Image (cartoon, grey):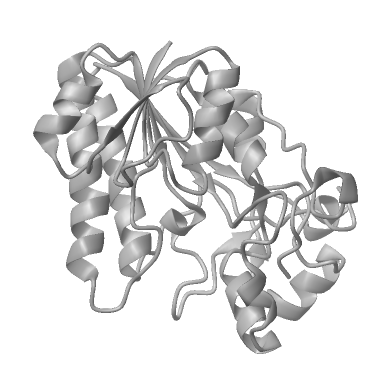
Amino acid sequence: MKVLVTGSAGGIGAWVVRRLLEAGHTLRAVDIPAQRQSSDYEYISGDVRDLPLMRRLLHGMEAVVHLAAIPYDIERQDELLLDTNLRGTWNILLAAQEAGVQRVVYFSSINALGQAEPNHPGLYLPLDDDILHYNIRNYSLSKHICEEMCFAFAARGVFSAISLRPTLVTHPGPPRFFWMRNMPEEIRIRSAISDFFSYVDVRDVAEAALLSLTASVNLHRAFLLTADDNRLHMPSAEVVEKYYPNLSWLKTSKEEYLARGEFVSLVDCTAAKQALGWQPKYSQFDPAAGSEVNL
């Protein structure tokens, strides 16, 4: 399959490119850095905010994996976040529609759900893809709106779209989040609470992107991605009791869910497993997996 990958030089994008090449796809990649990582694919230095360029790059493509984005809130840079995340995604979707692309894979985030936002600790456990969104922060809101864009364009019938919602992404090899270990415990815990102590290995994320290219999905679907265990080496029952004692268990009993495993993730990825055939393989508790421990 001929695939355009945006944000190809990023921390996730580079792994997605590697996995798609391994699977035999023909790639065209675009990112702002004027460098390429391999001669195995076509690389263009460019910005997703450039609509004429996106139209040229998507011509002849069968699919697009769209990762290019500002990945967090930046103080006093609201316009940059809005322009990159919203306009950039709009440009990709519009150009994909015009080019007759068959599948769009959009990289959203667990933040699109808007849980653990200010004054909103969450609605229920385990967190799943059906939860009502409650977006306050600009980054969270941008991801929510981009998912809605994907739905709207997919509903026009030209292509189908999948939004992937990874949680905190960990990498093998030298730690990328070493600075978190130097933070006061209170701040580290507060950060973990916001994504329900979840994490996912970048290799599993790249596999989800690969599976999304050919998964049998109509219109638009969105899928959370997380490891099967939590990123605290603490029994999940204790995590719930200490940090989420007031959240309800809407679809299952607490006892039944926690019986799945001592460290079972509080984020339920059943939808991705069923619809994509995806299964996380890497755990930070397994030394052989090579995934860093963040907390």
Counting from the top left corner in percent of width and height, residue 200 is at 66, 49
- Would you identify the image quadrant in which residue 294 lies? bottom right
In the rendered structure, the answer to whether residue 108 lies left or right of residue 81 reads right
The quadrant of the image that shows the N terminus is top left
Against 260, residue 63 (above or below) is: above
Foreground of the two, 151 or 177 = 177
Residue at left offset 62%, top offset 44%: 202
- Would you identify the image quadrant in which residue 49 lies? top left
Foreground of the two, 104 or 23 = 23
Residue at left offset 85%, top offset 66%: 233
Counting from the top left corner in percent of width and height, residue 192 is at 63, 71
In the rendered structure, the answer to whether residue 37 lies left or right of residue 104 reads right
Give the mark count.
0
The answer to whether residue 222 shows anywhere in this view is yes
Counting from the top left corner in percent of width and height, residue 104 is at 36, 26
Against 104, residue 123 (above or below) is: below
Counting from the top left corner in percent of width and height, residue 112 is at 42, 55
Against 230, residue 59 (above or below) is: above
The quadrant of the image that shows the C terminus is bottom right
Foreground of the two, 291 or 103 = 291
The answer to whether residue 219 shows anywhere in this view is no
In the rendered structure, the answer to whether residue 249 lies left or right of residue 262 reads left
Residue at left offset 75%, top offset 62%: 231
